[in-house]
Image (cartoon, helix red, strand yellow):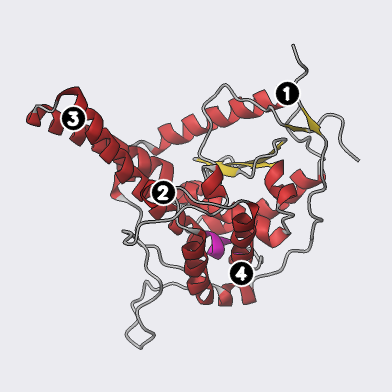
Amino acid sequence: MDDPDFQVRDDLQFTTPRPRMFGDCADCAAGRCTPPAQRSRRLFTGLLGASAFMPAWAREGVDVGPKSRFAGMISADDIERGGGQQYAQMMQQAAQQRALAPMDHPQLQRLRYIAQRIIPHSYEWNDRARQWKWEVNLLGSPELNAFCMPGGKIAFYYGILEKLKLEDDEVAAIMGHEVSHALREHARERMGKTAVTNGVVELGAALLGLGNLGRGLANVGAQLMTLRFSREDETEADLVGIELSARAGYDPSAAVRLWEKMMAANKGAPPQWLSTHPASGTRIRDIQANLPKVEGLYARASRPDQRFPVAPPLKSRQQPAQ
């Protein structure tokens, strides 16, 4: 039975800027974006050989290298504070539109249960996560989206649960992916990269006397550089995400099923050079290649003592015509 105070709104609007969402755009949400042939990554696909000389710091699980030095250019306190403020505004606006799930909604309880299992395994990836005031909410929107803002502010859109008929392991795959963005401070890193890139663009335009036209062309190049960084971040979040879900007792191979569902949701692809996310086929291959690294973690992890049904359809509600 539908909750009278919680319905999917086709017209859900936020006056605050929209955060980076799961998949980011409709094409990427469907796993349809195609990367360039050569991608720069911080990604390592495994430990370099099992031998008696394995270094003392070697750990079980995925290896994505150190966090980017660009993150250090932006204050973590500032970006977490800003993320928290934006999140609070979004939740307030959703509540005003009766598009914020009540505390006793079964699907919200499901999300919070899964989060409680994942969050304790996040601390190894970021010490700051121990002090974050984690929040999980469910928004009544048909979009196939979810996000985790800096500071551990998680939100799922009802559409991604309902339309993809997600099972718990697949929900954990999304949550692990989004939490990984926050743990690896990708937003902070991207802001640092943007600050450096913009500074170089302005300096180059001035030195070369390119004028407004030259500066505009240079800005396009700077934007494409930023898109390339985003592909790296997405790949990293995929891999850290499967480790988090495995440690939490959720099947990490569900990430493959998730992206197969995302692929089937829509068809088509934008031009390769405008891609901001790995293509679904590449993404699935990367995940599959790293599953053996987390199988042992999953085998030893305690299993969830609760399982939840898939999200049922909710009535949609549009704003009455003025």
Q: Is residue 99 magenta?
A: no
Q: Main secondary structure of the magenta part?
A: helix
Residue range in magenta is 241-245
Mark sitting earlier along the chain (1/3): 1
Measured in 3D between alpha carbons, the distance from the residue under mark 2 to the one under mark 3, in whole angstroms, is 24 Å
x, y percent for residue 15: 57, 21
The residue indicated by pointer 3 is: 214
Can you tell which of label 3 and label 4 is closer to the viewer?
3
Mark sitting earlier along the chain (1/4): 1
- Dividing the image into 4 quarters, which one contains the C terminus? top right
Marks 3,4: beta carbons within 8 A: no
Residue plotted at (47% across, 30% down): 82
* Number of the label disc, if any, that sits on residue 271: 2
Can you tell which of label 4 and label 2 is closer to the viewer?
2
Q: Is residue 32 left or right of residue 55?
A: right
Residue at the limit of the structure toward the right, as seen here: 1
Can you tell which of label 1 and label 3 is closer to the viewer?
3
Crowding at mark 1 (Cα within 10 Å: few <14, some 14-19, many 20+): some
Can you tell which of label 2 and label 3 is closer to the viewer?
2
Q: Is residue 119 visible?
A: no
- Dividing the image into 4 quarters, which one contains the N terminus? top right
Mark sitting earlier along the chain (3/4): 3
Q: Nearer the viewer, residue 25 or 309?
A: 25
Q: Amino acid at mark 4?
A: Ser
Q: Amino acid at mark 2?
A: Pro
Marks 2,3: beta carbons within 8 A: no
The residue indicated by pointer 1 is: 97
The residue indicated by pointer 4 is: 253
